[in-house]
Amino acid sequence: MHPPDLLARLRDGARERRLSRPKGPELAAVDDLAGPGGLRLRRYRPGGEGLPLLVFLHGGGFVFCDLDTHDRTCRRIARACDVDVLAVDYRLAPEHPHPAALDDAVAVLRQVRPAAVAGDSAGGFLAAAACLALRDAGDPLPGLQALICPNTDLTLGSPSVTEKGTGYGLDADVLAFFVAAYVPEPAARAAASPLHAPDLAGLPPALVVTAEHDALRDEGDAYAGRLAAAGVPVRHRCESGLPHGFIQGMDLTDPAAAAAHDRVFTDLRELIPRH
């Protein structure tokens, strides 16, 4: 498939999936806001005063998905975890390659100083990379980084890329397209990758959830291991039998995925700092 066709199909498919799914729980308030540089944000409030704030960065291979595709996920996190959620409509590649999306994530985190930052897939990459950028700049850090099926290595050098890169929903050739769109220069990909950061000390406590049948499994597992080795508190789990992207809608059709969602929500409730 020619890349422009692939990009159009990915974006169209995400919109179609959104329309096919139920809306998600009703909340006390859901408001669209303007963020730094005019970024589109969406704040989800389940109700109650003084709730901690979680910034959510959506997945989509750096090239597709938006506030609407992950609206249900954000509503469910807000309701299940009793937190305010602020979703970020960061700029997408290939129109806006690296570091545009990362710059957007960092700008929002600097402005709102949340209790936690979370993301799935490419959003997990951005959450991890933003924490590194904030640490290196001496800026305040979130109290938790929650990384769900994260991409952490843009070199795609882990065995699971080959072992799970066909037939499980995230194929290795599509993954390579995402990486090339986000960081076009191959020589720059390692330096942009959280897994290749020389030092992970001083980062926020982490929740890292990977999936058995995910091409990104090994790099997520490896990042959790490196965080722990650097002295960062880590809760890490690999969900047996599930593929990449299980956090997005699979609870509607798969009891195992629904149970995995409940475990993620429990983790977030327990680990997000509350003052």
Image: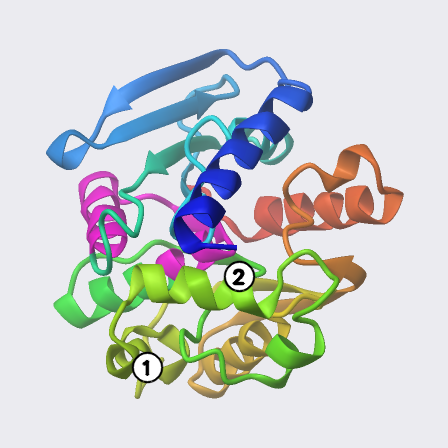
Location of residue 268 with respect to 47 vertically, above or below:
below
Q: Which colour scheme is used?
A: rainbow
Q: Name the residue under label 2.
A: 174
At a point 51% along the width and 32% down the height, the residue shown is 12
Going from the N terminus, do you reach mark 2 or mark 1 first? Answer: 2
* Residue 102 sits inside the magenta stretch: yes
Question: Dot 2: few (<14), some (14–19), or many (≥20) neighbours within 10 Å?
Answer: some
Give the percent coordinates (x, y) of residue 79: 60, 26
Identified by mark 1, the residue type is Ala
**From the image, which quarter does the C terminus lie in?**
top left
Labels 2 and 1 touching (C-beta < 8 A): no
Q: Disc 1 on helix, strand or loop? A: helix
Q: Is residue 198 left or right of residue 26?
A: left
Q: Is residue 204 visible?
A: no
163 sits left or right of 23 in the view: right
For this view, does 156 lie left or right of residue 186? right
The stretch drawn in magenta includes residue 105? yes
Q: Name the residue under label 1.
A: 190
Residue lying at 38% horizontally and 56% vertically, measured from the top left: 127
Residue at 43% across / 76% down in the picture? Answer: 153
Residue 75 against residue 126 in the figure, above or below: above
Magenta residues (range): 100-127
Residue sitting at x 62%, y 64% = 171
Q: How far apart are marks 2 and 1 (CA)?
A: 19 Å
The type of residue carrying mark 2 is Val
Element on which disc 2 rests: helix
